Amino acid sequence: MNNHVIETRALTKRYGAKLALDALDLSIAAGHIHAIVGANGAGKSTLFRILLGFLPPSSGSARILGRDSQQLTPEDRGRIGFVNEEHTLPNWMRVSAVADMQRHQYPRWNQRAYDEVIGHYHVLPEQKIGQLSRGERAGFNLALTLAQGPELLVLDEPTLGLDVVAKRAFLESLMYSSATESCTVIYCSHQMEEIERVAENLIILERGRLAHMSAPEEFCARVTHWVADIPFAGPPPAGVPGLLQVQRIDGLHHYLVLDQDEDFAQFLRGAGARTVQCMPVSLDRAVNGFLAKNHAMPAAA
Amino acid sequence: MPRSHALMLQIATGDPRPISKQIVDGVRMKIATAELSPGDQLPSVRGLAQQLTINPNTVAKAYAELTSEGWLESRQGLGLFVATPRQRLSNGERDRRMDEAIQAFVREVAALDYPPERALARLDRALQVLSRKSA
């Protein structure tokens, strides 16, 4: 028995000439809340589609809860909860009818978890799905999914388009529900504010590969912000070690760099810096700087 | 009556300090300024997590750090409490900080042009707070 909820080996998905997943090796341990971030096109959605068995890989393997993702049985699927950004539910049905349907669908239905989560929202049983606000639909969707008693809960941008109040209600019902305690949560989001509050493990995907995995604060500590007073042009960007981003603001050079220690100050002084200062960055800045690094950029800065 | 003391603590996302570190700093500061006193009970892990809308494991991590540093102590089955301060500094460091505090005080008093004996009398009275605390 291994205790990885997700395990991919050399997982590759090719759409024509484009590689969406590039020999991805990813192992996610059971328990905790894991956040997955990546720029658009990093391969997150493709990864989920393959893991949930909606899409076959071009090559490599993907296992979810110990099963081959391409051979999931209905019982296996019952152990996985999936909440997507659209919160797709039939608009013409009543809340009570959808809940009844799910209750019959899932043998491990947990009414207490449902009531606990839905209690965060003003949702009436007789309301039609089409009458619910986006935030209420998100809450209802989460209540249904947690009541199913999943061992693994995958949330793909669940709070996208929600207002502040609905977002908070969603996070609360996710983090403090008794049903979440016994399950592994994969939280996919671009919102660093949420990731800081929620995630114990940060997984960064980049161009279909695993770029980083650790506790969020460990990743944050890898990135530092340096400000140097360098007269004239400064060193060529290609020669700057660990460079993520460079900006010239009011005549000062700002460098966002990865995995640099005090030696970087020496480097800047060697490049003609008269003063050098260093400071830590927020998670938001660290992740965005990291993701921006490989974005297509004009050659001359 | 709630058993635990309200913990008036703020955290901010987007800060270079991780949230668990912000909690550690905040609690230390409250103990140092006597807003929290030895024997006060802290909120439960889950309670503080809900108050701040953060993952309970983040609170647990901060509490573990504060406990291992001797700021908090856990009482079996009862929860976490502010510990009775024990000496956390070496004798040398303690003397150095005392010198620093005295120098700062003297500099301020010098600027006030206050007679030393009256300053001393008032300092004596002010310090009685500490002797009462240790009694």
Image (tube, coloured by chain):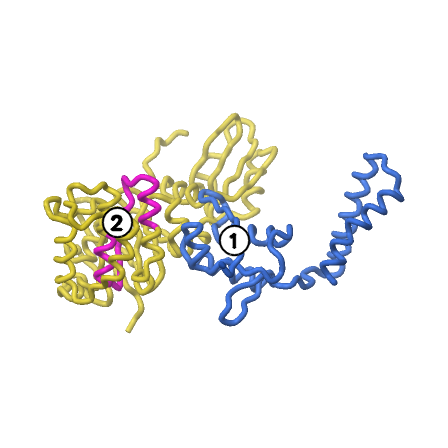
Using the image as rendered, state which of residue B51 and residue B13 is in the foreground. B51
In the image as oriented, which residue stretches furthest toward the front? Answer: B1
Residue A241 to residue A298: above or below? below
Q: Colour of chain B?
A: blue
Task: State the image coordinates of residue A225 (x, y, percent, origin top left).
Answer: 50, 40
Q: Is residue A259 visible?
A: yes
Local secondary structure at mark 1: loop
- Label disc, if present, on residue A139 of the rendered structure: 2
Q: Where residue A12 sits: x, y (%)?
A: 22, 54
* Same chain for the residues under marks 1 and 2 in the image: no
Frontmost residue, A164 versus A268 = A164
Decide if residue A37 is on the left or right side of residue B29. left
Q: Residue furthest left?
A: A92
User: What amino acid is found at the position of numbered circle 1 in the picture?
Assistant: Ala
Which label sits on residue B6? Answer: 1
**Where is residue A191, by image quadrant?**
top left
Magenta stretch: includes residue A153: yes
Question: Magenta residues?
Answer: A142-171
Q: In what quadrant of the picture does the C terminus of chain B appear?
A: bottom right
Say which colour chain A has.
Answer: yellow
Q: Alpha-carbon distance for marks 1 and 2?
A: 30 Å
